[in-house]
Amino acid sequence: MPSFAHLFETFVSSAPLFLKGALLTFELSLASVLIGLAIGLFFAFLSLSKIRALNAISNFYITLVRGTPLIVQIFVLYFGLTDVVQISGFLAATLALAFHNGAYLSEIFRGAIQSIDRGQYEAAKSLGMTSYQTYARIILPQAFLRALPALGNQFIIALKDSSLAAFISMDELFNMATTQGANNFDQMTYLIIVAVYYLVMVMALSHLVNLVEVKLKRSGAT
Amino acid sequence: MAHFLEAKGITKNFGELQVLKGIDLSVNKGEVICLIGASGSGKSTFLRCLNFLEIATSGSIEVDGQAIDPKTSDLNQYRANLGMVFQHFNLFPHMSVLENIIEAPIRVKKVKKSQAIETAMVLLKKVDLEDKAHEHPARLSGGQKQRVAIARALAMRPSLMLFDEPTSALDPETVESVLKTMRVLASEGMTMIVVTHEIGFARAVADRVCFIHEGRIWEQGSASELLDNPKEERTKEFLKAVMV
Ligand SMILES: Nc1ncnc2c1ncn2[C@@H]1O[C@H](COP(=O)(O)OP(=O)(O)OP(=O)(O)O)[C@@H](O)[C@H]1O
Ligand SMILES: [Mg+2]
């Protein structure tokens, strides 16, 4: 084990580099979750549709994502995508992670939408609102509020999962740690440092999720 | 005088179960009709057929002499003209009281926001809740929620109000505030169909009371005829049971 003094020294000297990596990790996670939200909402609607074929499509997608390792998905999408179109590694990694997160987000949305009381649809209908207005103004805002804690947790998972983008040579946190470790023949020091970075980010996010949850409960909006 | 609303031969099946077995009901402008009857007799289902929350299996509904066909009519426009108040309020919990009330006028009727707010405040005053405009529904008592729900329905300027047991989910001490609001509405000439177990309310306000039994209007008449001198055995039994 590296000594504490050595760890601290390396932590400080590597900070400029690692903060850059942390930023990229954050951007990668955020972008993939945002795109994943759109994908998730789309597949949630397919799941909830009365049309069997659409249910089957979303079922297939979710089974595929859940049934295969993320690293395989990343490689397949990365090489598949960069084979046919010229896109940056960042975009490929973002899309691969979005494809992965989308499946989990769609299940979160589906559950949240299903948990909204029938009476809400009926009230909106009885006021003359169209289906589109009912979803856009009444159902989805409530479903989104209810899903917020779960969405926050998915974001935390996405943050940790993004470390796998290191394998398609993204300069995110984890990649930073392995390269620095190899260059300096000091793997353990850099691995411990990178663990601290992840831990701090995850704890900050968890705290944020909790705050939002408490605030929502208090406002009575859910 | 032509009837305002005329429902003829309304039946409704849920799978094998026939819940409504042919209901005819004509409503004149300004009339207050109370529907009473045992649990499961089909009162809610009938009310929901009137604004097409349920589509009747057979029968016809005419409003102002115009037949409403669920396949070809613009049901949203039709529903915008009928207010509905539910047993469990169904307020939108993510919106303030004021937002609940102005939502449909703005989205459905395309009323200007400032105008919608003005109307909403007048209605809130009417239901005695002006000071709650910016609260969320979760902070209100049951009676207050129901009065907001009534204001929300009224904001669409409906020509008929449907009430489905509006006081059944309320604490006894808040029931009166809702009944009072409904009495005021009735006295202003609002056309109303009210499913209720409040026999006192029916007696005081209803122009006509219908006793629903097993999916039919078993007996109907003025409040005093039906409530004080029922002719049918079933009606007598029901009244005896609810008036203990
Ligand atoms: N969507 C539905 N699917 C199947 N059965 C239904 C449905 N809605 C109502 N029913 C059945 O229809 C019958 C009449 O129900 P309805 O709600 O109209 O009764 P009600 O007179 O309003 O009773 P209550 O006083 O309890 O509200 C009941 O047996 C009920 O179980
Ligand atoms: Mg009922």
Image: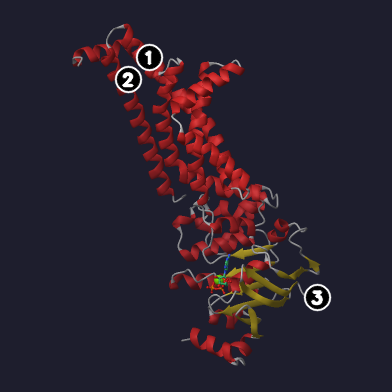
Q: Are marks 2 and 3 in contact (CB under 8 Å)?
A: no
Residue A176 disc label: 1
Q: Are marks 2 and 1 in contact (CB under 8 Å)?
A: yes
Q: Three-letter amino acid code at disc 1?
A: Met
Q: Three-letter amino acid code at disc 3?
A: Ala
Residue at the image position 66 percent from the left and 77 percent from the top:
B21
Q: Which chain hosts label 3? A: B
Q: Are marks 2 and 1 on the same chain?
A: yes
SS at badge 3: loop
One can see residue A174 in this view:
yes
The residue nearer to you, when weighing B156 against B238, is B238
The quarter of the image holding the N terminus of chain B is bottom right
SS at badge 2: helix
> To which residue does mark 2 refer?
A194
- Is the shortest distance between ligand 1 and the CB of mark 3 under 8 Å? no
Residue B117: x percent and y percent? 62, 52
Q: CA distance from mark 2 to mark 3?
A: 81 Å
- In the shown orientation, is residue B1 left or right of residue B158? right
The residue nearer to you, when weighing A49 against A143, is A49
* Ligand 2 quarter of the rendering: bottom right
Give the foreground label among 3 and 1. 1
One can see residue B165 in this view:
no
Residue B111: x percent and y percent? 69, 50
Residue B107 disc label: none
